[in-house]
């Protein structure tokens, strides 16, 4: 590449070459052709789409007209008319038999149109559903039946609604109901009831499901301008919103960038409106598009031949920068980019390389400091002393207690030794099994029982499969101690502490619950805010619980913090959940 181009900045390069290319490729002929042909093709495509909408309306009309004619045949059926008259004058057994016969007649009619009819039934002149089982009685109290309930002249189609058509295995279906009044064919002024035919909504609207490639969306409205069917096109507004309920189009119109093509369906009193975007119409004008594309290809060819060397010189270094940034975003901080374009991109690459190097150094320092901080804090939590002379002294106490025939003193001292052995080891393991923690806590409670006789009881509720699960060592002791000294002992009554351990969705859930004095809402909220803080906390009033919470945060993250529930004068429950797969177990076995 010539040296003068290398010295130019990106803006000058692209502007200069693009300006020359645009001047060479401008062609007014393509726009002239488009402006001439576009209206002609547009009108023809609209007519074609209008034909499609009319055919869809014909299919829907055929279905609804078939049901209307079918209903007309049913309501004049001699047996049906006879049964309705008989049921209006009989009761008890005869009424039951007639009702059964009526359902049989309707069931036979339903089977002949089972591809669209879900069910049919009759409502008598008193608006009572004639049925053997209570399936549709509550249905006719819904708003879809409002137009028919007291009108003995109106036959028509309801708005879509949900029905349950099987009493033993209820199945909810979306239906549209056709309602026809029944009159005595021998005396047309005598009203006998109404025939209700539930039509399968999915079958009825199936013709309205157009091929997405056509770009036509069908809306269907009933006589009240309510939507019967709407397409799955979130970007389209309903025709009622576009025109208003009283100004729906009577012929094809263009509004808000869409063509609206209305077609009426008299049999169901529906209005079917096809909506197609003006942009879709324009997109279908393939001939014009081919011409324009050909012209544009020629222009692009001219532009490419002149601008390609400069664009390549700009984009290649940019792509290197992008790839390098992606690598860094994935954590590959050893990334280095080499760019020799001689312009601002080369300067950017140099700055990028320096930035990545600085980030790598900062990350390494941060990781090292965090690791040292974690190890120090864990050691502080678990650090204990191991004075062997204590064991020797306590063993002497046991010997003297046995010699003085004081078994309680011996048992207490033995429990204390067991308690100390698990507490003050030189290198305590970070994890212990639930079974080991149970022994440890039992020893602790036994020691306290000698001081606070009959004041507390420790209850274990541990799933058998969890006994060998491992949790942070001594994690239960501060919680139990808190329950005793801040919950049970202040209550002045015998209390209990329940420790529950269970496996739940890949986690080990541990809770410590007591029936002590609990705590006030203000104190509970303050304690919760301390536990939920992302920073390690210190509070002398709750040092044990905060130590537990801090350990859990360090080991398992913020999801393992203590969850506290308490009701004043009723008790407190403290709960935490840790992963069953125990992260850090391998890296931090000993601290």
Image: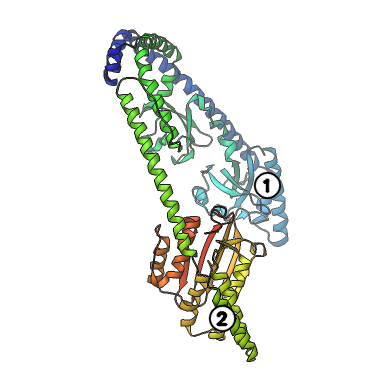
Query: Which numbered tag is attached to residue 393?
Result: 2
**On the rendered structure, is 247 left or right of 45?**
left
Q: Specify the farthest residue to the bottom.
A: 404
Q: Position of residue 170 (x, y in %)?
A: 64, 52
Q: How far is the residue under mark 2 from the one under mark 1? A: 104 Å
Query: Which numbered tag is attached to residue 517?
Result: none
Q: Residue at x 31, y 26 (%)?
A: 347
Q: Is residue 179 visible?
A: no
Q: Residue at x 39, y 67 (%)?
A: 525
In the image, is residue 171 above or below residue 336? Answer: below
In the image, is residue 385 above or below residue 320? Answer: below
The foreground one among 131 and 412 is: 412
Q: Position of residue 201 (x, y in %)?
A: 57, 40
Q: Quadrant of residue 59?
A: top right
In the image, is residue 245 above or below residue 536? Answer: above
Q: Quadrant of residue 464?
A: bottom right
Q: Position of residue 194 (x, y in %)?
A: 58, 48
Q: Which residue is mark 1?
A: 80
The foreground one among 508 and 327 is: 327
Q: Position of residue 156 (x, y in %)?
A: 53, 41
Asked whether disc 2 touches disc 1, contact meaning CB atoms under 8 Å apart, the reply is: no
């Amino acid at each position: 590449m010539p040296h003068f181009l290398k010295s130019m900045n990106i803006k000058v390069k692209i502007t200069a070459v693009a300006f020359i290319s645009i001047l060479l490729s401008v062609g007014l002929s393509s726009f002239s052709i488009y402006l001439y042909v576009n209206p002609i093709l547009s009108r023809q495509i609209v007519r074609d789409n209008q034909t499609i909408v009319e055919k869809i309306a014909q299919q829907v009309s055929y279905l609804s007209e078939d049901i209307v004619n079918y209903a007309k045949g049913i309501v004049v059926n001699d047996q049906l008319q006879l049964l309705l008259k008989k049921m209006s004058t009989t009761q008890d057994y005869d009424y039951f038999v007639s009702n059964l016969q009526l359902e049989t007649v309707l069931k036979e009619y339903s089977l002949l149109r089972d591809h669209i009819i879900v069910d049919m039934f009759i409502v008598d002149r008193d608006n009572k559903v004639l049925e053997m089982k209570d399936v549709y009685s509550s249905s006719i109290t819904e708003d879809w039946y409002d137009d028919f309930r007291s009108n003995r002249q109106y036959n028509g189609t309801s708005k879509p609604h949900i029905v349950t058509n099987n009493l033993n295995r209820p199945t909810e279906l979306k239906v549209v109901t056709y309602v026809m009044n029944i009159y005595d064919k021998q005396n047309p002024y005598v009203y006998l009831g109404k025939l209700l035919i539930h039509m399968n909504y999915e079958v009825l609207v199936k013709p309205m499901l157009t091929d997405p490639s056509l770009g036509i969306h069908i809306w269907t409205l009933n006589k009240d301008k309510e939507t019967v069917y709407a397409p799955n096109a979130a970007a389209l507004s309903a025709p009622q919103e576009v025109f208003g309920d009283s100004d729906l189009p009577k012929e094809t119109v263009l509004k808000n960038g869409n063509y609206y093509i209305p077609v009426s369906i008299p049999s169901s009193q529906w209005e079917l409106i096809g909506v197609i975007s003006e942009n879709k119409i324009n997109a279908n004008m393939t001939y014009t598009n081919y011409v324009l594309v050909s012209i544009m290809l020629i222009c692009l060819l001219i532009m490419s031949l002149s601008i390609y060397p400069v664009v390549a010189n700009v984009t290649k270094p940019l792509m290197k920068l992008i790839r390098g940034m992606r690598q860094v975003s994935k954590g590959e901080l050893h990334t280095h980019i080499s760019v020799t374009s001689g312009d601002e991109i080369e300067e950017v690459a140099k700055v990028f390389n320096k930035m990545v190097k600085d980030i790598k150094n900062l990350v390494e320092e941060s990781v090292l400091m965090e690791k040292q901080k974690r190890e120090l804090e864990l050691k502080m939590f678990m650090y204990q002393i191991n004075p062997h002379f204590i064991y020797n002294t306590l063993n002497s106490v046991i010997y003297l207690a046995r010699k003085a025939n004081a078994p309680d003193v011996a048992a207490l001292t033995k429990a204390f030794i067991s308690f100390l052995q698990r507490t003050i080891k030189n290198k305590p393991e970070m994890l212990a099994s639930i079974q080991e923690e149970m022994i440890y806590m039992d020893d602790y409670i036994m020691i306290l029982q000698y001081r606070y006789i009959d004041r507390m009881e420790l209850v274990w509720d541990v799933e058998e499969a969890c006994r060998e699960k491992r949790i942070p060592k001594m994690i239960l002791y501060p919680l139990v101690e808190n329950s005793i000294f801040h919950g049970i002992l202040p209550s002045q009554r015998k209390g209990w502490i329940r420790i529950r351990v269970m496996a739940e969705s890949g986690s080990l859930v541990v809770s410590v619950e007591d029936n002590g004095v609990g705590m006030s809402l203000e104190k509970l909220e303050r304690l919760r805010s301390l536990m939920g803080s992302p920073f390690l906390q210190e509070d002398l009033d709750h040092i044990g619980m905060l130590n537990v919470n801090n350990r859990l945060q360090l080991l398992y993250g913020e999801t393992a913090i203590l969850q506290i529930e308490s009701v004043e004068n009723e008790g407190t429950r403290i709960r935490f959940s840790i992963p069953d797969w125990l992260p850090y177990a391998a890296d931090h076995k000993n601290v």
